[in-house]
Each structure stands twice: as C-alpha cells, then as structure tokens.
Amino acid sequence: MSRPKVITIVQEGRPVPPVERLDAEAEVVVVRTADDFRAALPGSEILFLNDFRTKLLREVGPGELRWIHTSSIGVDSLMTDEIVHSDIVVSNSRGVCERPIAEWVLGVLLMFTKDLRRTIELQQARTWQHRETEPLLGRKVLVVGPGPVGRETVLLLRAAGMDVTVVGRSARDDAQLGAIASFNDLDVLLGEVQDVVLTVPLTQETRGLFNAARFDKMRPGSRLVNVGRGAVVVEQDLLQAIDAGHLGAAALDVFEHEPLSPENPLWSRKNILVSPHASGDLIGWRGRVVDCFARNLERWKTGQPLNDVVDLKKLGATAPRVVSRAAATLP
C-alpha cells in the first residue's frame, strides 16, 4: 500500500484543501457530487471527509471504505446505520479548531461586557456618548459540555479571570477542569451564572436541551453562546426569551438549519450575534487539517493505531437521527 487511493469529499463551491501535500503518499480523488462519489468508491478504502454537512454517505453509502477521517471534530454526517454498525474506523481532526473556537467565545463575551457593538453603532452615527461597561474579571460562566472544545474554552476563560463551572453528562473530577457537575444539576446552576456557553455535541440527550423551560431558569439579563450544535437550542424559544427581555443577548455560531435562511428572524435582533459556523476557521485551517490527516495516513500505512478515533457505536446509542441509506432516499 505505497500510494493508497484516498477519496476527498469537498462541498460544491468550496475550495479544495491543499491535498497536493499528499501526492507522495496517496492517490487523491476529489469528489463533490453523488455521481463522482459512486464512481470513485470501487477499490477505495479511505475517505478524507472535508464537508461536515455532506449527504453523500447517506445517499450513496460507504461502499468498501475501511477508514474515514473527518476535517471537523463533529461526525454528524457519519451517523448512518451502515457506518455506525460497521467496522469502519472513524477519526477526526482534533487539535485544529478547539482553540480558535475558544478564542471566539472569549471574543463575544468581551464584546458583550464591553458593549462593543454599541460603540461601533455610535461611531457610525458620529455620536460621542460616554458609557460604563461590565468587568470580565470574576464573571460567572457555565460551560455545558467538557469535550475538546469545552475543555479549551474553560481553560481560556479561566485564564482571562472568569469564574467557570462545567457541566457534563455525568458528575466527576477532571485533572485539568476540576469538578464537573452532571446534567441533573443544570437547572440549579443556570440561575447562578451570568453567561452560558454550549459546547455539547448533538445527541438524543442534548437535542432541544435549551428550551423555554431552561431559558426561564437562567438569570434575567444573562447571555447565551452556542458553538456546539444548532439543534441543542430551540430557536423559537430563544427568540421569545430575547424579545421578552429575559435574556440579555446571544451569540450563535451554529443553527439547526444551515446556512441560515435570509427570512430567519434571528438576523434581525440587535442583541443576537449571527455567525456562519466559522468560529473555528482560522486562516490556514485547511492545511492544518491535511497535515492532521497525513499523520494518521502514515500510521494507517504502517499498521499503527490511528490517532483521535471516534466511537460511533457509543454515540449511536444516543444519536438523534441514525439514518440508513434506504431511509435517506425516502421523500
């Protein structure tokens, strides 16, 4: 297996990552459509997935693939019956997007506390209006989801002087994060913090986790930041909490349906920041993802265990929609 064939799925209209870096190690075939994917599958064992929204695996199926590496941390597009209940090894690109996402979270919390959006509005209106702002130091934050993104976020916010509590699926002690509370404590903790940051994946347990009842339990004027998955938040309930003045603001980088339609009312609220699922996309991130895959490719070729393997069967037990190829073709 000196130069194995590697299929790379890239979203239509998006640039191809610098896969030419792999030329000496693999024969790379870039596909964008279902027909291209079907044509490339025969004889292919490796997929380098560069479109986390792709439906090609649901439409076409995985063929004889034995290893799928994703350019993202999330594996939503791989949660199909054929893949979850197969022996396909799945790995992701940990270490590429976690810190940038954490920096984005810190940035929006700074924007809110220092009222920077209003400062820009006043500048555009050529209005000199002295105002006082809030401190970041000591601000109480709840991070929901202690995974790789949540971990980086907690560490960065604490380094900035914020008082951060962490919630996960189960209560436990963590060597880096300290005490982690369980989801059972969530409702109580919501009333004790000023900011809530969502970094959880989408599972049966987290779908709609933040709904009207949860927003009611948050402190008046508190703020929500979501960099996990859009469907963790019931968007209509969030809008109602914002419009009622109960929540002070929200920053959203993920949405239940992406891209967000121009008609969606989330665009029009001055105290909601809409970001196009780009919090982790630093300049040069595509090259870093290729380098991450290349390191795993070398391990694959030499028979070593892959880095950052994801247990889909474990996720599949709680996945909200484990879709079969047959089901995906239904109207």
Image: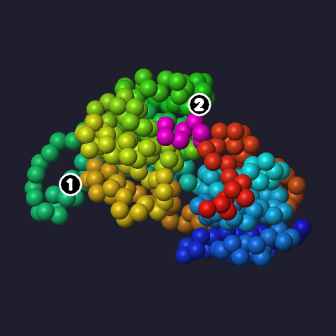
**Closer to the N terminus: mark 1 or mark 2?**
1
Q: Helix, strand, or loop for circle 2?
A: loop
Question: At 59% across and 61% down in the image, what residue appears?
Answer: 53
Colour setting: rainbow
Question: Which mark is drawn over residue 169?
Answer: 2
Where does the C terminus fall, quadrant-wise?
Answer: bottom right
Relative to 289, 155 lies left or right: left
**In x, y percent, where is residue 171?**
58, 24
Q: Amino acid at mark 1?
A: Thr
Are the residues tagged 1 and 2 within 8 Å (C-beta)?
A: no
The span shown in magenta is 203-209
- Which mark lies nearer to you, 1 or 2? 2
Q: Helix, strand, or loop for circle 1?
A: helix
Farthest residue, direction front: 331
Question: At 55% across and 66% down in the image, what residue appears?
Answer: 284
The residues bearing labels 1 and 2 have C-alpha atoms spaced at a distance of: 39 Å
Viewer-proximal residue among 299 and 257? 257
Which residue in the protein does label 1 denote? 119
Q: State whether residue 109 appears in this view.
A: no
Where does the N terminus fall, quadrant-wise?
Answer: bottom right
Question: At 50% across and 43% down in the image, what residue appears?
Answer: 232
